Image (cartoon, grey):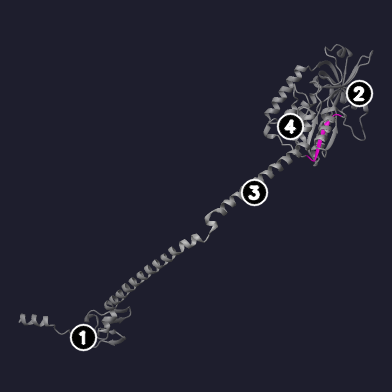
Amino acid sequence: MTTPSTAEQPWPVRTVSLKVQQWISRLGDVWVEGQLTQVNARPGTATAFLVLRDPAADISLTLTCSPRLLTGSPVPLTEGSRVVVHGSPTFFAGRGTFSLKVDAIRPVGIGELLARLERLRQLLDAEGLFDPRMKRPLPFLPRTVGLVTGRASAAERDVLSVAAQRWPAVRFAVRNTAVQGPTAVPQILTALAELDADPHVDVIVIARGGGSVEDLLPFSDETLCRAVARCTTPVVSAIGHEPDNPLLDHVADVRAATPTDAAKRVVPDAVAETAGVRELRARSRAALVAWVHREERGLAQLRSRPVLADPLRALDARADEVQRLRTTARRDVRRHLDTADTATAHLRARLRTLGPAATLARGYAVVQRVDGTGAHVLRSTADAPPGTTLRVRVADGAVHATTTLTTDPPPTPADGAQQQEDR
């Protein structure tokens, strides 16, 4: 049927199922990796049903295969096994279900898992997730400690008991999750997000009491490592597996060897802190007493000095010298003033003798020609023709005059002698 479906002409169920089956059959064969969470192979049946789950997400896929693939596997395939399967997507039109028809199952060995983890470790290290500069310091006294661990596990008991012994007032926000298997990573991610969003939680501890390499695979999951790196709250990794550290130990802000070690790192020891406070108080008291005694000795030495025993003796010794210096200074100042007064009087007399006022007082006058440009000293009769306005300055003032006649000056005795000689 190629006619598009409408409300008036809908497709029947068989048509939709057949079309979906046709589209899915075009996908071809695929290789898929995951973790087996359910294996159902009943004796006498021709088909075995399995559930393959993504280790980092809450997504699963139904598998169908021949029971011979399970019985002929070199490694027993059980729930929790990591496998790589090859098959083709299949849609059963009769039931409307989707599955992957598998024709090959390959268990993932320890060597291959370790090689993958090494490649992932190098990738995360190259991205800077292991950089010590990115590690956040733990608070000295956290208000609430977030704990992610298995329910009723030894790791939970160790962390809670040791922390309570060290600091009885400590509070915990416990999130019990699966710590191995296909559901571990999603549950740990959910608990980690809840604790990181809680403003009262100051530090988060992810604890497990050790295990095999396969059991600890969730703590090397890439999604979990990146989630821990994105946390704003400091994270402590306490997996308790020394030979092969999971990648979470490198990404976390602090790595603890065991859950007990994590409790010791997260909260301080009240007994040790109290002893430290007492020691510091004793040291402070001793330092203060020593300082007071040292200052008392210094004051006693200062009080015993002559300058403090008789403070005025030094002033009395200098009083005569100060008086003598004052007398000498006063005498020198007076001598300099008398010398300067005499020199000033001599200069005043010389200025009075050489000044124009003295000349005018002896009967002389200064004649100036007054015109539009100002007053000019008259130096020749030629500069004062008849009608010229003159200003005559004498000792006690000045008068103005106008020239009416210009005459030659009378001959001097020297001029008369020269005329007699000429005749």
Q: Read off the residue under disc 1.
A: 406
Which of pointers 3 and 2 indicates the residue nearer the eye? 3
- Furthest toward the right, the residue is 44
Question: Disc 4 versus disc 2: distance between alpha carbons?
Answer: 54 Å
Mark 2 to mark 1 CA distance (whole Å): 154 Å
Q: Quadrant of residue 231?
A: top right
Which circle, 2 or 1, is nearer the viewer?
Answer: 1
| Image coordinates for residue 341, horizontal then vertical, percent | 34, 73
Count residues near mark 3 (Cα–Cα under 10 Å), then give few for <14, some for 14-19, many for 20+: few
Which of disc 3 and disc 4 is earlier in sequence? Answer: 4
Disc 1 residue type (three-letter): Thr
Q: Residue at x 33, y 80 (%)?
A: 372
Q: Which segment did they paint magenta? A: 142-150
Q: Secondary structure at mark 1?
A: loop
Q: Which residue is mark 3?
A: 292
- State the SS at label 2: loop
> Callout 4, which amino acid?
Val
Residue name at image x 57 percent, y 54 percent: 303
Tag 4 residue: 254
Density class for disc 1 (Cα within 10 Å; few <14, some 14-19, many ≥20) is: few
Under tag 4, what secondary structure? strand
Whether residue 255 is visible to the viewer of this picture, yes or no, is: yes
- Look at mark 2 in the image and give the residue it sits on: 93
Mark nearer the viewer, 1 or 3: 3
Image quadrant of residue 233? top right
**Mark 4 or mark 2: whose residue is earlier in sequence:** 2
Please name whichever residue, 69 or 245, is drawn nearer the observer in this view of the structure. Answer: 245
